[in-house]
Amino acid sequence: MTKLFYAAAVILVVAFLRPAAVIAGEGNAARIEAEYGDIRKNARPRPPRTPEGTNWWLYDITLREKTGRVGVTVESWQKCYQGVGIMVCDPRRRNIKELFGTDRLPPGGMIRLRRPAWVWAEPTGNYYKVRGTYYGRDDNGNRVKAVYWLGVTSN
């Protein structure tokens, strides 16, 4: 049992240390990045389904293809939340065209959310991390993803 666990750990570490393009199976893979900006606390309009008495943050998201060589079709996205006593992820959603106006990220190009993303929290004084992940496939068939981390304190 110990040898099996050790072997699995070594394989896992090696997989995480290899570049994403190599893991995807193609050395000519796209590289996409997700970045957030213009964070606004309790700004109007109040997001839908945000409970009364809570704090909320609106923020913009931009996706960029960084190699300039290959385009990407963005297929889905997911948000996960981490804080005191919480680690939960929303289901993956496939409404990229609705959110960005397109699912196509051209080589070296960028797309932005049409409306701000948002997150809410009870005013506990706790720090929370939000991880947003965007999944897609480049024009060479490689799977690609981009991740942003956003941290907020809800007081």
Image (spheres, helix red, strand yellow):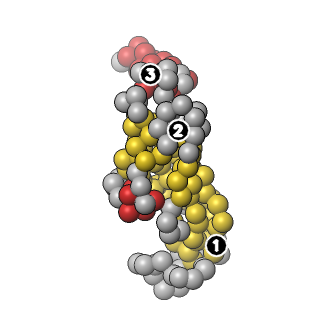
Callout count: 3
> 10 Å neighbourhood of mark 2: few (<14), some, or many (≥20)?
many
Kind of residue indicated by mark 1? Arg
Read off the residue under disc 1: 40
Read off the residue under disc 3: 26
Secondary structure at numbered mark 3: loop
Residue 65 visible here:
yes
> In the image, what residue occupies the spot 45% across and 81% down?
51
Q: Position of residue 22 (x, y in %)?
A: 48, 21
Tell which tag, 1 or 3, sits nearer the viewer: 3
Kind of residue indicated by mark 2? Pro
- Residue 64 got which mark? none
Kind of residue indicated by mark 3? Glu
Out of 98 and 85, give the one closest to the viewer. Answer: 98
57 relative to 14, above or below: below
34 relative to 31, above or below: below
> 10 Å neighbourhood of mark 1: few (<14), some, or many (≥20)?
some
> From the viewer's perspective, is 69 left or right of 5?
right
> In the image, what residue occupies the spot 57% across and 77% down?
55
- Quadrant the N terminus occupies: top left
> In the image, what residue occupies the spot 66% across and 66% down?
38
- Residue 107 got which mark? 2
